[in-house]
């Protein structure tokens, strides 16, 4: 049998950083969205109404984080 077997032990569950709602990534919808972006994260709107970021850490676990604007740049 010639083939490659790949095992993934990453945590595919993540929570909203605002309200703690638990999500599960079973169909890889968000992983595909993260993979298509240059920034390495995607934005999700929670059922509580807040938007948060979702990224994948070095171990492959999904992590939700609060989106903030550190600096606002005015373009003339």
Image (spheres, helix red, strand yellow):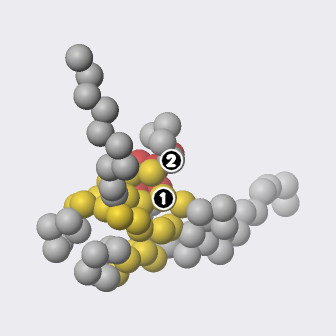
Label 1: few (<14), some (14–19) or many (≥20) C-alpha neighbours in 10 Å: many
Q: Are marks 1 and 2 in contact (CB under 8 Å)?
A: yes
Residue at 26% x, 80% y is 19
Q: Is residue 41 visible?
A: yes
Which residue of the protein is positioned furthest toward the left in this rendering?
Answer: 49
- Disc number placed over residue 23 in the picture, else none: none
Residue at 55% x, 75% y is 11
Please identify the quadrant where the N terminus is shown: bottom right
What element does badge 2 sit on? loop
Label 2: few (<14), some (14–19) or many (≥20) C-alpha neighbours in 10 Å: some
- Disc number placed over residue 40 in the picture, else none: 2
Q: Position of residue 28 (x, y in %)?
A: 44, 60
Q: Position of residue 50 (x, y in %)?
A: 20, 65
Q: Is residue 46 left or right of residue 25?
A: left
Q: Earlier in the sequence, mark 1 or mark 2?
A: 2
Q: Is residue 69 left or right of residue 27?
A: left
Q: Is residue 23 visible?
A: no
Q: Is residue 39 above or below residue 17?
A: above
Residue at 61% x, 72% y is 10
Please identify the quadrant where the C terminus is shown: top left
Which residue of the protein is positioned furthest toward the right in this rendering?
Answer: 1
Q: Position of residue 57 (x, y in %)?
A: 59, 63
Q: Position of residue 66 (x, y in %)?
A: 35, 64
- Disc number placed over residue 55 in the picture, else none: 1
Residue at 66% x, 61% y is 58
């Amino acid at each position: 049998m010639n083939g490659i077997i790949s095992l993934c032990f990453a945590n595919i569950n993540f929570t909203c950083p605002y309200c703690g709602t638990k999500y599960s990534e079973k169909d890889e919808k968000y992983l595909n969205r993260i993979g298509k972006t240059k920034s390495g994260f995607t934005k999700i709107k929670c059922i509580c109404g807040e938007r948060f970021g979702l990224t994948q850490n070095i171990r492959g676990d999904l992590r939700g984080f609060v989106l903030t604007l550190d600096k606002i740049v005015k373009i003339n």
